[in-house]
Amino acid sequence: MDEPGQTTTAVPPPDPMDERGLAGFADDLRANRTSIAATTEAYLARIEALNPRLGAYQHIDGDRTLAQARALDALLAAGTDLGPLMGVPVAIKDIVVVDGMPTTNGSNLDMSDVMGPEGTFVRALKHAGCVILGKTKTVEFAMGSTGINHVRGTPWNPWDASIHRIPGGSSSGSASALGAGLCAFAIGTDTGGSVRMPAAVCGLFGLKTTKGLWPTDGVYPLCPTLDSIGPLTRTAADAAFVFAALQDCPAPQPAPPRGIRLGRPQDHFLSGVDADVERCASQAVDALANAGVEIVDMEIPHSQELRELMLPLIASEAVAVISRERFVRAENIMDPSGWGRMKKGLETRADEYLRAAGQHEKLARIADAALADLDGWVTPTVPLSPLAVDQFETRDGIERLDPMMPMSTRIASYFRLCAINSPIQMLGAPLPAGLQIISRAFSEAHALSIGLMLEEMNGPPPRADVGGFL
């Protein structure tokens, strides 16, 4: 069914992954303590109960999903085990093509001519035996950091049922769904922070993979130069489990603190951070130092150029994908905020675009060299606690707050690096906050090992109380 909208007062079953995570589910499944169908039914019941208020999903098809789950149970009973992710129910961002499900890209503008068939990554999830629950909402064409979508609706942040707070963007529905326990893990995409920002403001773990690690065919190409795919998970342990399964490699283990060196930027990445985020980030970094991690104060090279270079690059490619003529005609169809951000692509000269693209290649090499003797850079992921949606509705709010959201995340994207968001709310904030670790290209396993170390030190992140959404 499409966007279920009937509110129900029935108390949903508990989240099947709450107690033991993905590895525990895999053990329970193979010990016949649970089944794929029962787990899928529990998630569908939770979606039916909670999604009408949360608005996390754009599309679900319960009958199709249950049929898939039962078929996988039969396959496992017959002796065919597809691997660690077999039977795990996953939600997929609605800019990713899934056969038999509509792809809206968070828009009313038809872009089916651009999308193509189901891609390599989704096929890999299916081959691994994942159960695809449905498609989660997104900022229109994935162009936005707050998660606000005036065209298809803005999901609620599951941490507050009384105030509509931003879920982060552009993988807004994926974060909202996972944070409310409406899937076991979720797939997002990240061009300038679109996995890490929603993970940070919804209290989740997020992995931004290096551009090119996982193929993006079948994914709407916001900015082909920068686009990447990444999972959102409850914990670092779940992220390591997903990564190892999809990469067919040993699961990363927690890094020993002694011997780890992290650079702490001293420039504008520490400006404008609100008190709760700053307090939690400072405590997290102090705890790392006390455990034996070497913290090195430094400045990220060429970081001040990012805004000047990144928006023209993204906006130019975004308009080119839509086509200039179709984009201009769509002004009254698209979300005005997103259209306004993309409009920069109409104004960017060819020489400006070529400079931005050329600098991307140059600065990726410089960043790699700057990280040669470090295990990563550490920053707050998002400088703001999850604010109310209406704070972004005024011109002042948009101009003042919107550019702050990706202040720290865009460096990993433009410098072609990988990064994680680790939840740190438990260190003293009433709402979610995140710590970002940025590591060298294709060093995802090492970044995850640092995330696992942080999780061992701080404990698993708290879960949102979603009772108010019933």
Image (tube, rainbow, N blue to C red):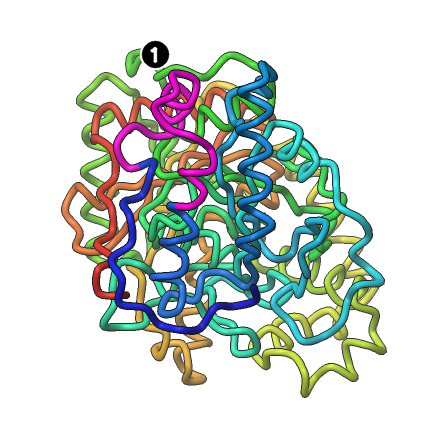
Q: In this picture, is 265 found above or below 344?
A: above
Secondary element type, mark 1: loop
Residue 443 location (% of width, % of height): 54, 23
> Residue 388: percent from the left, percent from the top?
31, 72
Amino acid type at circle 1 is: Gly
Q: State the predominant SS element of the stretch in magenta.
A: helix
In the image, residue 452 above or below residue 186: above
Return the x and y of residue 285 as percentages of the image width and height.
25, 33
Q: Which residues are magenta?
A: 18-41
* Residue situated in front as seen by the camera: 439 or 54: 54
State left or right for residue 25 relative to residue 438: left
24 in the magenta segment: yes
From the image, tell me which residue sits under label 1. Answer: 259
Q: Quadrant of residue 237?
A: top left
Question: Magenta stretch containing residue 170, yes or no?
Answer: no
Q: Is residue 267 at all visible to an observer of this figure?
A: no
Say whether residue 204 is left or right of residue 90: left
In which quarter of the view is residue 366 placed? top right
Quadrant (top left/top right/bottom left/bottom right) for the C terminus: bottom left
x, y percentage for residue 64? 60, 50
